[in-house]
């Protein structure tokens, strides 16, 4: 698992570098990093050589604002050139704040929350009807669960016994600039998914061991939608912005980015304070 930690560290570096010259949704991207790294390196059959293979697996990033974590992972596993990440928000490329299908490996445009669970259902149902063995994963934000379409999707997935489909909830406790439980409480989340007919596992979303244990049990129960609730920390890796409501979208200066990279590496002398960092 040390190799996965190294990859996740590099992905977080990429995310931080994308948080300047226009910025990105850095906090949520950092919370989802370990999930995305694990799925692409250890669970899903997706690589640069099989993107057009109908037998490959599928990942849908419904919380599309986490796309810096996805692009960073693509760079680390060879789906794209690392140097291309420098084109983030450039008019000469297709990298911006949400996924773009012009980027090889992106399955579907996302950004308006609540839609991709239904898209993932369509793909999973097609696979079932064809007798395929492909796995389909859809990553959702916890705040996204306020969208009724997500719960409709859970009902439909179970009605069609889509045990080849996994909903992964990035449970970082925040939506935009407010804590989820202060706006529309979600708990008890495990019980709600279970009541809707899903087979549910709740784990530490930053533990590769816990991720491996959970996903190794796929499918969790025959004929049931698989749900993984991954407890994560917004801004994971940067103590100065971790678990803060105001660290949703950030546009840092180049100097602040360099300080954050040092903080990520464990240089406590450079840890930035709330007074130092400015949200633009």
Image (cartoon, rainbow, N blue to C red):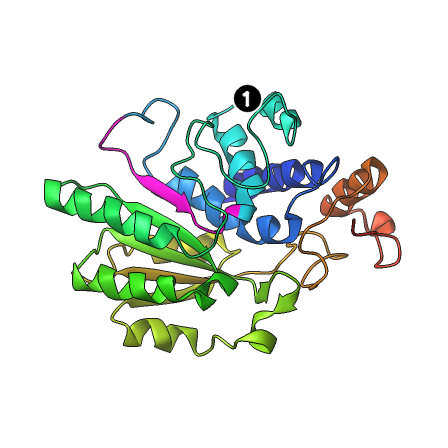
Residue 1: horizontal and vertical position, in percent?
A: 48, 45
Residue 172 visible within the image = yes
Q: Is residue 144 shown left or right of residue 30?
A: left
Q: Which residues are magenta?
A: 53-64
Q: Is residue 25 shown left or right of residue 209?
A: right
The residue sitting at 35% across, 54% down in the picture is 117
Residue 151: horizontal and vertical position, in percent?
A: 34, 67
Residue 71: horizontal and vertical position, in percent?
A: 53, 35
Task: Examine the structure image and report whether residue 59 is included in the region drawn in magenta.
Answer: yes
Residue 216 visible within the image = no
In which quarter of the view is residue 140 placed?
bottom left
The residue sitting at 58% across, 23% down in the picture is 93
The residue sitting at 31% across, 48% down in the picture is 120
Task: Examine the structure image and report whether residue 56 is included in the region drawn in magenta.
Answer: yes
Q: Is 156 drawn above or below residue 132 in the view shown?
A: below
Residue 177: horizontal and vertical position, in percent?
A: 66, 63
Task: Say which residue label 1 marks.
Answer: 81
The residue sitting at 77% across, 56% down in the picture is 240
């Amino acid at each position: 698992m040390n190799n996965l930690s190294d990859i996740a560290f590099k992905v977080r570096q990429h995310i931080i570098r994308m948080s300047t010259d226009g910025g990105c949704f850095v906090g949520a991207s950092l919370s989802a990093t370990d999930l995305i790294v694990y799925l692409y390196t250890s669970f899903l059959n997706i690589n640069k050589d099989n993107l057009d293979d109908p037998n490959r697996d599928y990942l849908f990033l419904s919380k599309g604002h986490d796309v810096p974590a996805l692009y960073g992972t693509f760079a680390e596993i060879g789906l794209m050139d690392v140097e291309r990440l420098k084109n983030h928000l450039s008019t000469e490329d297709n990298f911006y704040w949400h996924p773009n299908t012009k980027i090889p490996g992106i399955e579907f445009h996302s950004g308006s929350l609540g839609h991709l669970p239904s898209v993932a259902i369509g793909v999973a149902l097609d696979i079932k009807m064809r007798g395929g063995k492909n796995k389909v994963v859809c990553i959702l934000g916890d705040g996204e669960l306020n969208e009724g379409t997500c719960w409709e999707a859970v009902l439909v997935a179970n009605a069609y016994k889509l045990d080849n489909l996994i909903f992964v909830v990035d449970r970082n406790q925040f939506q935009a600039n407010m804590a989820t439980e202060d706006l529309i409480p979600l708990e008890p989340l495990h019980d709600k998914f279970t009541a809707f007919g899903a087979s549910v596992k709740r784990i530490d979303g930053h533990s590769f061991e816990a991720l491996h244990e959970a996903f190794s049990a796929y499918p969790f129960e025959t004929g049931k939608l698989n749900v993984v609730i991954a407890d994560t920390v917004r801004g994971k890796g940067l103590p100065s912005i971790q678990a803060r409501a105001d660290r949703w979208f950030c546009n840092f200066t180049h100097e602040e980015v360099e300080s954050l990279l040092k903080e990520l590496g464990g240089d406590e002398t450079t840890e930035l304070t709330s007074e130092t960092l400015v949200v633009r």
